[in-house]
Image (cartoon, helix red, strand yellow):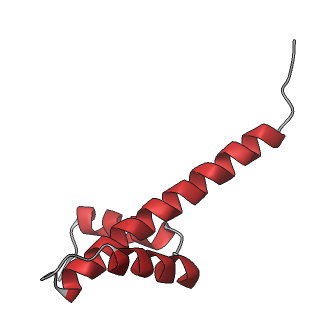
Amino acid sequence: MAVSSSKQANLKASASKKSISNETKTEAMKVAKATQKPGQTKEQTKLIAQGIEKGIAEYKNCKKVRLGSAIKPVNKR
């Protein structure tokens, strides 16, 4: 059975993404459980934790980029 090109692209994109550290995952789960509403299911809490993980990862990535650009010397002409 052939896999469509869009599915192949998604597989490549997900494989190239960096994995999120266990520390980040536990921190995200703590935050998600702390903000959990009454009647919220475990699946909903996991989804919230995944969103928090992505936000933390994006924040760390932006921080690295900002620090890297601050260290690079500026070429003046």
| Percent x, y of residue 60 | 59, 59
Quarter of image, res 50: bottom left
User: Which residue extends farthest bottom?
Assistant: 42
Q: Quadrant of the N terminus?
A: bottom left
Residue 66 on image: x %, y %: 68, 43
Q: Is residue 4 left or right of residue 50?
A: left
Q: Position of residue 53 (x, y in %)?
A: 44, 70
Residue furthest left as drawn: 39
Which residue is rendered at x = 78% and y = 39% of the image? 70
Q: Residue 43's quadrant in the figure?
A: bottom left
| Image-quadrant location for residue 18 | bottom right
Q: Position of residue 34 (x, y in %)?
A: 36, 77
| Residue 20 vs residue 2, the one in the foreground | 20
Q: Residue at x 54, y 55 (%)?
A: 59
Residue at 54%, 84% (x, y): give it: 22
> Would you say 7 lies left or right of 32 here?
left
Looking at the image, residue 37 lies above or below residue 41: above
Figure check: 61 above or below 51: above
What is the tally of numbered marks visible in this picture?
A: 0
Q: Is residue 29 left or right of residue 70?
A: left
Q: Is residue 33 above or below residue 17?
A: below
Quadrant of the rendering where the C terminus is positioned? top right
Q: Nearer the viewer, residue 73 or 45?
A: 45
